[in-house]
Amino acid sequence: MRICIAASEFPPVFGGGIATFYGNLADLLSSAGHEVSVLTDVPAEPARFDDDALPYTVKRLSLRTGRPATGDDYRRALEAEGGAFDVIEAADYSGLGVHLPGLQPALAITCHGTVGQVDHHSGRTEPPRKNRLRSHHELLALLTADEVNCHSPANQEDWQRFLGRRPMFSRAPYLAGESRENSKLSEAIDSDLELFGVGRLNNWKGVLELAEAVDRVRATGLRVRLKWVGRDQDAPEEGIRSVLEHLRTSRPRFFHEAFEWQQSATPSEVRSAHLSCHAAVVPSRWDTFNFTAVEALDCSAPLIVSRGAGASYLCRPDENALVVDARSVDQLTDAIIRLRDPSLRQRIGRAGKRTVEEHFTADAIVADRLAVYESAIDRRRYRAKHRYGSVAGIAEAAKRNARIALGSRLRSLGRRLLGAGGRTPR
């Protein structure tokens, strides 16, 4: 099959899970004999990521003006290919896919998490205009794509209930096979229990509940430290502009005595941390998947995971992980205390690794993805034969109407201000 992955996040930039997903997916599909081409606007960095050494093709959009690429730039690049692909895959995030319906290849959208979902789950009740426009585009892409795909049953069900169409499920493209075992798996803990977490420092990643749980554990006299990697963000639901600053001022003893924060880390640094911590923790209130949960399992790191994380579908309570309810400080506290037991850590750590090895095989991942692509191609053929209307036209008209509607609100605001005598609102 001839496959194009249109990805606004791709190596060598690893700002989040999407880049890792698509780097892995391109490797797996090309290794299975498929013709894969990646279209991205991420600049090349040969010293970090050599495109010429890859088993697939990478085309990087180069814009002379230096401006960020738009969906229309991607569309024009694909139109220039003249139908060279059977299927295009794009992420839901930011609505890139809304620019791609109507091209000759079928279009499959994979749900990694939309701007609209993030705004909702962070408690942002009045998103900025840019976010509202992006969320309109995201929904249009999901409604008009030939097929939609999710990496977790929880996100699949969420979108089915919202959209009224059931997305397909496919295993996330995770390359299992870490040969090393967590070095502290059976170590008796005489000092600090070392926890490790990765993700944006915000509310929906569950950091606020985790900080309180660590404080409660320390209040019992047990020693625990948390290392967290991920950039600082706000928490709109709680009215917090900086979670890092909030932890510094509201929990000073935790912040100075039990917390280590790092803004970013390379994939190899994250893997090393999973191999050397006493336990990994994924306390998300909500997450469409959470790639680092699977990385932790693969490294045999004992895992505490919330049911809010999509990847928790892999976890069986007390068998291969400790599973807690989202937002439950009580359950997080109890789980942290229990993991001081080396026999429990050893048992669930090794069971978690087996889960990843059995679930994320290359053959199964590729088979899942091909089923998504074949469904998209089949629907594209059906739509071509049954011309009830133009899917591309629907998307274009809706995009135009969304821009006009949002723009008119700004214009009416200006008129209201002028009508008030030009006074500056306080």
Image (spheres, rainbow, N blue to C red):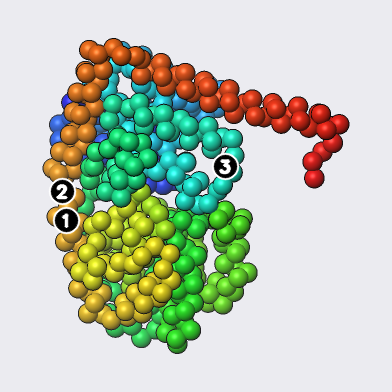
Residue 22 x/y as whole percent: 31, 39
The label shown at residue 357 is: 1
Q: Amino acid at mark 1?
A: Glu
Q: Quadrant of the C terminus?
A: top right
Structural distance between the alpha carbons of marks 1 and 2 = 7 Å
Q: Which one is in front, 32 or 131?
A: 131
Q: Amino acid at mark 3?
A: Pro
Which mark's residue is nearer the viewer, 3 or 1?
Answer: 3
The label shown at residue 348 is: none
Structural distance between the alpha carbons of marks 2 and 3 = 40 Å
Describe the element under mark 2 as helix, strand or loop.
loop
Mark 2 or mark 3: whose residue is earlier in sequence = 3
Describe the element under mark 1 as helix, strand or loop.
helix
Give the answer, above or below, for where 183 lies relative to 262: below
Q: Is residue 415 visible?
A: yes
Q: Which one is in front, 51 or 47?
A: 51
Q: Amino acid at mark 2?
A: Thr
The residue positioned 30% from the left and 50% from the top of the image is 154
Q: Quadrant of the N terminus?
A: top left
Residue 86 x/y as whole percent: 23, 22
Structural distance between the alpha carbons of marks 3 and 1 = 41 Å
The label shown at residue 127 is: 3
Give the answer, above or below, for where 309 lies relative to 339: above
Q: Which residue is mark 2?
A: 361
Asked where in the image residue 127 lies, by quadrant, the reply is top right
Check disc 1: other Cα within 10 Å, few if <14, some if 14-19, many if 20+. Answer: some
Mark 3 or mark 1: whose residue is earlier in sequence = 3
Residue 40 x/y as whole percent: 39, 30
Label pair 2/3, CB-CB below 8 angstroms: no
Label pair 1/2, CB-CB below 8 angstroms: yes
